[in-house]
């Protein structure tokens, strides 16, 4: 994938939900796709699911019958990895395991042409580490789609330390042609979304542990501030095994920074097997007729605002630090949180609406109350507040 070179053929490794979704996106954008998986059953299931999707799109008038046939025809499914040899871009979408991905990348390199770019759809693993195991690390990059890939617009593009500098811009242009909203992120734990979003869960859990409010109260406060779901609803939906594991991984990756500390309360839910919706019980009991019970006591509007502003301020602080540390630009951070997790506003736009000094005061107040480095204000946020500046020039 050299400068100004057309990307004619896309190879995708892994025909699970994510790989199949990416294949659909590429095909709908007019690309020819080779979808490889060792499992014939996975490939058959992938084809059947895409056919159902196309039928629904035809019924909704979003594609014609001819277009639906063309989209399905452009995807060639195969159990032979050598079919990837002519691909210009390979996107790996296998299990989230570094050792497995290393083996996949080694095999891909044996097959594809030297100009091909090899991308990983990992949501958490180090792209630099993956690249280091390759003979040509300069062509390795992260390309993180969000689930479900055909519906979620965000794609995080993560260059490894070794990645050729022209590739991120090439992929930005390609993802835009595919109708996606691409952002470029530094190769650090959590990239943009999974890093910046941690306080949405962590600060809510902290307030629950302290008895400031119950789960329903906190969820209600966040919905009132514009979020589609409260943090406890969302954790129940994601699954506590998954959400806790991501939090623990980020915590360890950042050398046990208190800002990312997991919650014992959530750990106990995991230990009990109360994983949320998929197990029938989490913070809410989904086996009962009233699946999301009312709060034990109604909070007054002032208390609701205090809860939401605490969580939002911590989210803003994390977003500001991502800019300060060069993880991503202010614009890309805002796009990532809008398009990747459906936040009601870009966090740094939100900061400017609330007033940067107010956000600094909330965080400093938490620091004074708790005396913890968890509540340390981003230097960039403090500097801009002091100067009367903003994130968006």
Image (cartoon, rainbow, N blue to C red):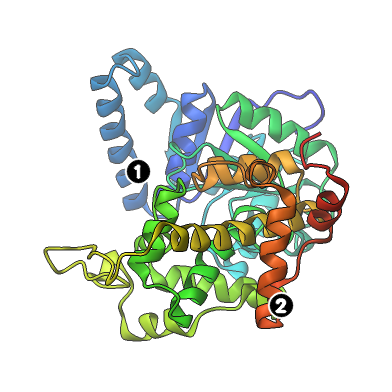
Label pair 1/2, CB-CB below 8 angstroms: no
Q: Is residue 285 left or right of residue 304?
A: left
Q: Is residue 80 left or right of residue 50?
A: right
Tag on residue 368?
Answer: 2
- Depth check: give the residue in front, 371 or 86: 371
Q: Is residue 148 above or below residue 122?
A: above
| Residue at 60% in and 53% down | 193
Say which element carries label 2.
helix
Q: Is residue 253 visible?
A: no
- Depth check: give the residue in front, 332 or 68: 332
| Residue at 39% in and 19% down | 70
- Depth check: give the residue in front, 65 or 210: 210
Q: Is residue 214 visible?
A: yes
Tag on residue 326?
Answer: none
Question: Alpha carbon of mark 1 to alpha carbon of mark 2: how far?
Answer: 54 Å
Q: Is residue 290 left or right of residue 27?
A: left
- Depth check: give the residue in front, 36 or 393: 393
Question: Split into 4 quadrants, where in the image is the C terminus?
Answer: top right
For label 1, the residue is: 46
- Tell me which numbered mark, 1 or 2, is placed earlier along the sequence: 1
Q: Position of residue 67 (x, y in %)?
A: 37, 16
Q: Position of residue 154 (x, y in %)?
A: 56, 40
Residue neighbourhood size for the residue with mark 1, other residues' Cα within 10 Å, grouped as few (<14), some (14–19), many (≥20): many
Q: Position of residue 112 (x, y in %)?
A: 68, 43
Residue neighbourhood size for the residue with mark 2, other residues' Cα within 10 Å, grouped as few (<14), some (14–19), many (≥20): few
| Residue at 45% in and 26% down | 74
Q: Which image quadrant is residue 261 in? A: bottom right
Question: Split into 4 quadrants, where in the image is the N terminus?
Answer: top right
């Amino acid at each position: 994938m050299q400068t100004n070179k057309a990307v004619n053929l896309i190879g995708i490794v892994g025909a699970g939900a994510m790989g199949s979704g990416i294949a659909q996106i590429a095909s709908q954008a007019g690309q020819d796709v080779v979808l490889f998986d060792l499992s014939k059953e996975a490939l058959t299931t992938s084809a059947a699911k895409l056919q159902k999707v196309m039928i629904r799109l035809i019924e909704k008038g979003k594609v014609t019958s001819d277009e639906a046939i063309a989209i399905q025809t452009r995807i060639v499914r195969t159990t032979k990895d050598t079919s990837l040899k002519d691909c210009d871009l390979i996107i790996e979408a296998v299990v989230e395991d570094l050792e497995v991905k290393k083996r996949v990348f080694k095999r891909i390199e044996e097959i594809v042409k030297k100009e091909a770019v090899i991308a990983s759809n990992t949501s958490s693993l180090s792209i630099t580490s993956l690249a280091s195991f390759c003979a040509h690390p300069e062509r390795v990059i992260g390309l993180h789609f969000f689930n479900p890939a055909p519906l979620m617009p965000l794609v995080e593009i993560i260059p490894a330390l070794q990645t050729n500098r022209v590739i991120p811009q090439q992929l930005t242009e390609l993802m835009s042609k595919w109708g996606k909203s691409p952002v470029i992120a530094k190769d650090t734990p959590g990239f943009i979304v999974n890093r910046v979003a941690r306080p949405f869960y962590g600060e809510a859990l902290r307030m629950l542990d302290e008895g400031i409010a119950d789960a329903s109260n906190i969820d209600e406060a966040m919905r009132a501030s514009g979020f589609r779901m409260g943090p406890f609803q969302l954790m129940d939906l994601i699954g506590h095994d998954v959400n806790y594991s991501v939090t623990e991984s980020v915590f360890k990756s950042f050398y046990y920074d208190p800002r990312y500390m997991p919650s014992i309360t959530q750990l106990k839910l995991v230990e009990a097997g109360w994983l949320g919706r998929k197990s029938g019980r989490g913070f809410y009991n989904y086996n009962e007729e009233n699946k999301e019970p009312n709060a034990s006591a109604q909070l007054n509007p002032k208390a609701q605002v205090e809860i939401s502003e605490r969580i939002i301020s911590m989210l803003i602080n994390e977003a500001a630090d991502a800019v300060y540390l060069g993880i991503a630009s202010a614009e890309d951070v805002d796009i990532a949180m809008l398009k990747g997790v459906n936040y009601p506003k870009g966090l740094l736009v939100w900061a400017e609406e609330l007033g940067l000094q107010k956000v600094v005061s909330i965080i400093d107040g938490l620091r004074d109350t708790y005396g913890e480095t968890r509540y340390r204000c981003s230097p960039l946020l403090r500097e801009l507040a002091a100067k009367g500046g903003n994130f968006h020039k």
